[in-house]
Image: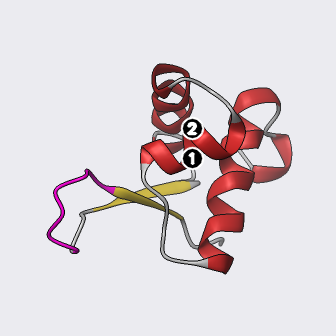
Amino acid sequence: MRVEELAGVDAEVYRAVAESEGERSSPRLQDIARSVGLSLEETREAVHRLLHTEPKILHEVPDTSGTDLGPVYELAPRV
């Protein structure tokens, strides 16, 4: 799937991650949910779909802040 083909919730989640990367550090699931106005479960489902697309659209990155608030998400490099 290509980024240009995203629609609905998946497109909103992708956009939220893209916008967060430009403003501050990569967002956590809670940050994404808050920014798009979805529940954590709805956001988790959309993130899961985006993590498992071919080619990759989103990457999960381990939290290195030491806060143990879960992974952060970044856009995958576009090829």
Q: Is residue 68 visible?
A: yes
Residue 61 lies, with reference to residue 53, above or below; the image says: below
Local crowd size for mark 2, using a 10 Å CA cut-off: few (<14), some (14–19), many (≥20): many
Question: Residue 68 appears in which quarter of the rendering?
Answer: bottom left
Q: Amino acid at mark 2?
A: Ala
Q: Is residue 54 visible?
A: no
- Name the dominant secondary structure of the magenta segment: loop
What are the residue bounds of the magenta stretch? 65-71
**Quadrant in which the N terminus is drawn:** top right
* Residue at the (74%, 53%) spot, across then down: 15
Q: Where's residue 61, x and y in %?
A: 32, 63
Residue 40 lies, with reference to residue 54, above or below; the image says: above
Residue that mark 1 sits on: 32
Instruction: Confirm whether the magenta stretch covers residue 6.
Output: no
Question: Residue 59 appears in which quarter of the rendering?
Answer: bottom left
Q: Circles 2 and 1: CB distance less than 8 Å? A: yes
Label 1 element class: helix
Q: Where's residue 76, x and y in %?
A: 54, 65
> Mark number for residue 33?
2
In the image, is 36 to the left or to the right of 76? Answer: right
Q: Gap between marks 2 and 1, in whole Å?
A: 4 Å
**Quadrant in which the C terminus is drawn:** bottom right
